[in-house]
Image (cartoon, helix red, strand yellow):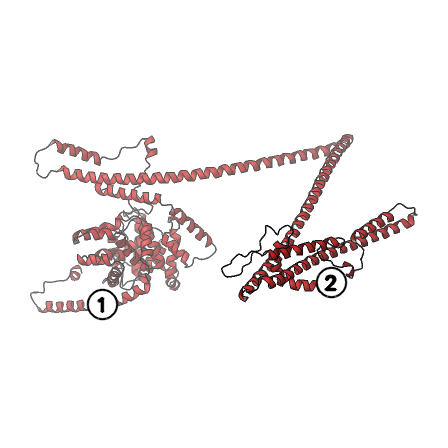
Amino acid sequence: MLHRRKETAEESCHHHFSCSRNSMSSLRKGGNENRKSVFYTTEEWELLDPTPKDLEDSMALEEKRKHLAEGNKGLTSSAFPFDFGRIPHKARRPLKEMIGSSKNRTSSDSSPTEWCSGSGNRLVSELQLKYQSQQEELEKLKKDLLSQKELVRLLQQTVRSSQYDKYFASHLCEGVPKDTLELLHQKDDQILGLNNQLEKLNLEKDNLQQEVKNLKCKVGELNERLGMLMETIQAKDEVIMKLSRQLSECEDSTSSQSGAIHSPTATCANKELQELDRLKDNLQGYKTQNKFLNKEILELSALRRNAEAREREWQAKYTSLEAKLCQIESKYLILLQEMKTPVCSEDQSPAREVITQLLEDALKAEPSEQPEQAFFKPHLVSEYDIYGFQTVPEDDDEEKLVAKSRALDLRSLSLSENREISTGVKWENYLASTMNREMMRCVELKNLIRSGIPHEHRSKVWKWCVNLHVKKFKDSAIPGYFQTLLQKALEKPNPASKQIELDLLRTLPNNKHYSSPTSEGIQKLRNVLLAFSWRNPDIGYCQGLNRLVAIALLYLEQEDAFWCLVAIVEVFMPRDYYTKTLLGSQVDQRVFKDLMSEKLPRLHAHFEQYKVDYTLITFNWFLVVFVDSVVSDILFKIWDSFLYEGPKVIFRFALALFKYKEEEILKLQDSMSIFKYLRYFTRTILDARKLTAIAFGDLNPFPLRQIRNRRAYHLEKVRLELTELEAIREDFLRERDTCVEKRDLISDDEEDS
């Protein structure tokens, strides 16, 4: 029956709990005078006070509950009488009596009695079992008591809520709209749910607090155990030390007693132990010293790097200042030369003598530097660069100053760039990765070559690039093919031999390897050109081939330079590029004009406006791949990419040179000054990195297919023009043969022959 009451209480609690919460303020003891119940009756939320009759009824209910509570004090603390004796349970006695009887039994059972030793253990075990069963029974009773109290509390709330609901329905709900009542019930349900959630959270909080207390107790126990273990370890260490001392004393006494018998062996063992200890000490000392030295080395390395960086900065500043000084001296020299001979003066004036003296002082050779001055002013400009090209000419003083200024600018530019170091490291890493395998075409290698091949690796990479393009020719050739051609050329001179001999010393006169007949490069150049003339009798020799071979011989052996020329003439360039008509070269100039109109339209329009034919300048660029047109550093970077990627590199760098100086060229406003500027402007470009960025970055996209299509288109046009010229020539010859007056007219070719 009690369980059914509990279920009924729980069902009604959800429905009336909110009303009981609102009525609690009027039902509490001593709270009737100062507390007011607030009810939301309309949409405007008016506050209504309870009537005096309501207050009297609540006071009467409170007094009645108090009397009932006093009458049932022996049963429970609730205000309602419940018969707990009817609850079916095996323990019907009051809790205090049960606890007291349990204690009396325990004390009586544990009172001292007289028994024999055999039955003592049996009695103790029986008493322990009784005690455990009583403890379990006590725990069950406590749990039952808690459940009964919770049930009483729920029933109290149910009764209060039902009373308030009856009161509310009878007195307050008269004339209240139904919607308002539903809203109040919904709010009461929400309040009930929140209260239940709050109670659950409070229970969880209590459980967590209890767990924290338990964990703190466990931590305290673990700390105590840890302290005990530490004391035990310390005691064991003391025992070990004591036993070690005793053992050493025993060994000493034993060795002293048997010293006469085992003295040599003991002495050797002691010496070995001492030597071992000494070596251990030395090892420890060396380790400490090594750490200290490593630290010193790192600090010194950092200092050295900082010093090198400062030195590079100062050298860059010094070379820049020296270049400016050379420029000023050049202008000063020009001024003095102009002032030396007055325009309208026949008499010898003192001013003329002063100007002559100043001119002599300006042209005077630099005095030998003192040792202390040499320390602060290093010789940064040498007579030849690393490629063998002469940096400062000897004949013209003005050109000498200009060349010295250019060399100093190059030196300053190279010192101010730290990227060269990282490029060298990348090349070292790449070549190290190809130690056990062949080099292959890849994007990484192409980017490295575009950034420039280091001087020490250029021979190896150029040779690989040449073999990559002429592999099919070398595979089909007989062994010793180059030597066979060379031997044939030496035994039977061909018609090209005479022109080759005439052009040998005119190839690169400003390079020490080809400057005199006894230079080491002259004979190599002769051999390669003679062998190539026998391989290609249709070409034989064309002016420009000597410069291509001369550049190749700076890094390649004779046979590799021969195959390099084969790759350029037979693989890279179209047919008839180096023949007598130079048909392929003319076609490339027309293709270049198309590209100029697309890539640099402003500059192309500027040239068209002043009728400047810039192909007269660029023709030589394409024929000899920029030899003698740009400074040596830029020249070899162009050749690096040219030997790997092919002829489109020439178009790229030709456009990049014009793009580099586009603004300066656009400032010129007459054809003579433009053409004069175009003849030398490429020698003033010194920044290879900027030029390379323009060629491979700003001019993209640059497909080779487009160049091939343009070549095919212009080739047909040039062939038609040559056919027309040949027809005009034949008509002229026929007319000359028939006309007596024109028989004395001869062409240039006939005059040469």
Camera-near label (2 vs 1) is 2
Q: Which mark is residue 76?
A: none
- Residue 151 position within the rendered picture, expressed as x and y whole percent measured from the top left: 70, 59
Q: At label 1, which amino acid type do we have? A: Lys
In the image, is residue 360 above or below residue 140?
above
In the image, is residue 230 above or below residue 697?
above
Q: Dividing the picture into quarters, in which one does residue 493 lie?
A: bottom left
Instruction: Locate the N terminus and report the quarter of the image it occupies.
Output: bottom right
- Residue 344 position within the rendered picture, expressed as x and y whole percent measured from the top left: 8, 38
Question: Which of 183/722 is in front?
Answer: 183
- Crowding at dot 2, Cα within 10 Å, few <14 / some 14-19 / many 20+, comes out as some
Query: Do the numbered discs 2 and 1 sit on residues whose CB atoms are within 8 Å?
Result: no
Question: Which of 327/488 is in front?
Answer: 327
Q: Dividing the picture into quarters, in which one does residue 273 lie?
A: top right
Q: Which mark is residue 2?
A: 2
Residue occupying the far left of the picture: 741
- Crowding at dot 1, Cα within 10 Å, few <14 / some 14-19 / many 20+, comes out as few
- Residue 332 position within the rendered picture, expressed as x and y whole percent measured from the top left: 20, 38
Question: Which of 509/667 is in front?
Answer: 667
Q: At label 2, which amino acid type do we have? A: Leu
Relative side of 258 to 586, left or right: right
Relative side of 289 to 709, left or right: right
The residue at which mark 1 appears reads as: 717
Distance from the alpha carbon under mark 2 to that under mark 1 = 118 Å
Residue at x 73% of width, y 53% of height: 70
Q: Find numbered disc 1 in the image and state the secondary structure of the residue it sits on.
A: helix
Instruction: Locate the C terminus and report the quarter of the image it occupies.
Output: bottom left
In the image, is residue 352 above or below residue 632?
above
| Residue 679 visible, this orientation | yes
